[in-house]
Each structure stands twice: as C-alpha cells, then as structure tokens.
Amino acid sequence: MKNNSYKFLAENNDYESRRQGRTRYTLVRQTDNIKKILIDGAAMVITCDDRGSLKVWRDKSIVVENGKIKDIFSFGKKKVDFEKFDLIYHAYERDGMVVTPGFINAHAHPPMYLLRSSMSLDRGNIEEQVVKMAEFEGKMTHSDYVLGAIGDFTEEQSNGITTTFSHYGSFEAIEEAAKLTKQNVVNAVSAISNSHPKNSIAMVERILKKKDKYYTKPAIAIHYVHRASKKQLLQIKQLMKKYNVIFTVHAAETENWVQECVKKFGNRTIFVLEEMGLLGPNIILSHAVHLTEEEIKLVKKRGAGIVHLPTSNKIHKSGIFNYATFYKHKAINQMALGTDSIISKNSLDLLSEALQTRIMHQDKKIVLYEDLFRMLTCQPAAMLKLGKVGKILPGYRADLSFWKLNDRSFIPYNENKPLSLVGNMITHGYGYIRDLMINGEFIISNRVHNVVDEKKLLHELQSAHMRLRKRMKK
C-alpha cells in the first residue's frame, strides 16, 4: 500500500500557521530539514538522572541536534546565538512548560484499535474474549491492520508516548504504520498466533535476518507458553541468541492458563521458561498476575522484564498482580507499564495506568510516584535495550513531551518540593499534551498532529470499522 493512499496524512509541518497567535515556535530559517532546535527556558524538566534518581530541574534550556540532546543549561545563564538554530521553541512563554521524556508503552496490540466497540466486555472472561478477538481479527485485511495501528500510535502520541512495544501477528503492518506516524516501535511479531495461524518460527527468522533494514526494531512474541511446543520454545531460544533480540510472552495472565501450562509441561509458567533456558534479561513477561513467590524470586534473579497492566487485568477479571511481593524481592526496578489494546483500557495513555497501579495496590503496598515515573521512562528503556532513551540528558535521543505548567494537572503544587509535580501529573493528569518531539522532530505542535490529519483519520477508521462489521455480519 502506498503512502499517498492515506487521505489523512498532513501535507506539511507549517508550525506558524497552526493556532495563530498562540504558537511557541519561531522558524529561524525556512528549511524542510530542521536539525538544530533550541528549547528555550522550560519552567520544569522532569527526568531520571544517570543513576536513575528522579529529578526536577527548574528553568532549563535544551539544545537538540540531529535527533539527540546535545546540551542542557540554565535559562538566561549562557550566551546563546539564536541565529545558529533552525527552530526556537519558546518554552518560557505564558507561564512556562513542563518537559518530560517521552513515555514508553511496554505492551500494546496496535491494530486492535479498529476493534473499539466490537468487544462486549460486560460479559464473559478473558478466555472467551480471546476467542472473540481472533474471530474479528481473522476478518481484518492488511489495510485494516495498518489503519488500526495508525489510530493506536497517534492516540498514544497525543498522550505523550514516543515508543511502543508492539506484540502482534503482522510485522509488516506495524512497520508501515510506525514509519508513517514516525513512532518508535519495538516490533515483536508472533511466531505462534491465534489471529495469524500461518505465522511460524521460520517466518520470524526471515524477518530477523534483515532486522537492521527496518524502521522498527524486530523482536519475537508468542501469546502464551502453553500454545507452543518444547521444540518451538527451543527454536525461539536459538533465534534470541543468534540475532540478539527480545522475546515477549503473556505470562500467567489467568490461573486457568497457568494450569494449561502445567497440564502440557508439568510445571508453572516461569519454571517452564527457566527449564527451556528462556528466562533472562532478554525476555519481557506481560501481565505476570498468577506467579508464586518462588516464581517472582526467580524472575528477579534472572533479570527478566515485567510489564504490569492493571486496567486490562481488572477489566478482563484476570486477577490481582502481586506488587507487594515483587517489591519485597526488589524486582520493581525490572518493571514497566503498558496499555494493552484499546479493548482492554479506556484510553491509550500511561498516566491513568500509573494511577490505577497506585490505587490497586495501596492496601498492601504504596507504590511511590517516583517509582511509577521510572516505570514510564527509564526502566522500560533499559528492559527493551533501547540504549540512550528515556531520560533528558546529553547524548540521549530527543524524545520529549511538553505539558503546560499552568494547567489543572499540575496546579497547585508545592513550589518548595517540585517533585510534587510528579504526584500531580499521575493523580490529576488528564487531556492531551501540547507538543511532542520524536527523534528531534516535532510530531505534535500546538496540540495539532503534524503528520496525520486526525479528522480525516477518524473518518477512515469509522468507515473501515463498519466494513469489518459487515464482513462479521454484526
């Protein structure tokens, strides 16, 4: 499918014509290749430092060059030659901006965006819903997968998410949607899939052989351990080692599925992964609801990544994640948060997921705001082996989210303890960000998407959704 077939793609990045009189952008020179940007005087910068400690810095300017953060310095304390920049972002104007790293969504099924309203979540359990999902997805076309993923990525971007860990059966659709929306994506393709029964480990290896040629970062996925054979699990282990890639699996999402694993392999999920040599720092375990204490201790020992999905688990009646025991065994530094799919969450944002995490576990263990912020930024960056991503520091990728300080999400806060802004952001945060930068490029400016015409996109999504319902006769 060619890019020009998408009627909703915006034609240009004309920052100054959007929201006339309210823009913070000044184009120093007319160019289609903006490489050097000054973010001038952010009121607050919230980030983890090089040791992973959460910091709030006041009145900072940030220099971005060729997609990376080149320098950070105190606003007004350094002589700046503005003519050397292609673009100036006036972060100090109108009470100022809060700048955070772009959030990292550690578990998503992007094409399922097209299924919004298709699933009846008021009845049945997750096992029944999985069967129903496969029926819908079996009727979707490649165009549907791409369009659904575009809808997903653009909603994530509006919520400050700049990187997505995608788990899906169609690698090519995710690749195309990521490239069109300019979203950073770790693209885990299902080697064994309900919705894509023709997928195979051989197909996954064909993709991995060309892994450096893609826009996205390839990885391996299976839905559940009990859906694979021992031979297939060993083949996946070999691929992980040969191509140095991440493997992800829905782990112990329900006790019924744990028992399916016991029935097939004679042991619980984590112990099977350990026996097969798969449990280690290159595996990401999503959900991880029904783990025993011994399994949690083993997860910690092996350094496996954990993705907590409290809203999805609650909606699907999967059970309660044992945060207190993960905390007891010092495993929360291996933890991130994810949205799952649009049918498993009210909206594709991570701030509400962080709040849900805090609320869900407060009876047994308070989840600290600073720990939650790390779960949105630096920890998933480390888990997904992204390198210098997830922090606002020199040399790091310029993935940045911009939020208005003078907003009900932040105000009032304790000026003597600016870390209170993080608590406000998670507890009271709502609505979309104002501006978003990915790889040093403003993807959203003045709350307007610069790559996609969202009004046209919504029309396309609605039309495709109704065509799918017609094929399903629903």
Image: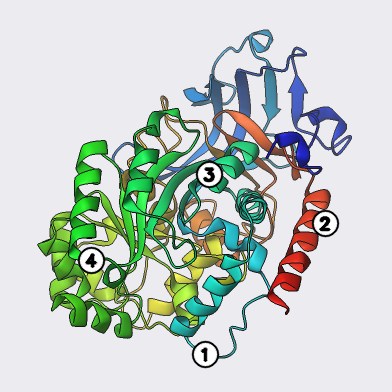
Cα–Cα span, label 4 and label 1 = 28 Å
Q: Closest to the observer: 67 or 169?
A: 169
Give the labeled residue for mark 3. Answer: 172
Cα–Cα span, label 4 and label 3 = 26 Å
- Residue 206 vertical position relative to residue 267 in the rendered view, above or below: above
Give the labeled residue for mark 1. Answer: 124
Q: Closest to the observer: 198 or 5?
A: 198
- Give residue 212's position: percent from left, percent from top: 39, 29
Secondary element at image label 3: helix
Give the labeled residue for mark 4. Answer: 229
Q: Amino acid at mark 1?
A: Gly
Q: Amino acid at mark 2?
A: His
- Give residue 361's position: percent from left, percent from top: 38, 77
Quarter of the image where one finds residue 221: bottom left
Whether residue 262 is visible, yes or no, is: yes
Q: Earlier in the sequence, mark 1 or mark 3?
A: 1
Scheme of image coloration: rainbow
Secondary element at image label 4: loop
Give the labeled residue for mark 2. Answer: 459
Q: Earlier in the sequence, mark 4 or mark 2?
A: 4
Tag 3: Cα neighbours inside 10 Å, few (<14), some, or many (≥20)? some
Tell me the residue at 64%/41% (across/down).
97
In this rendering, the label closer to the viewer, 4 or 1: 4
- Give residue 396's position: percent from left, percent from top: 42, 30
- Cβ atoms at labels 4 and 3 below 8 Å apart: no
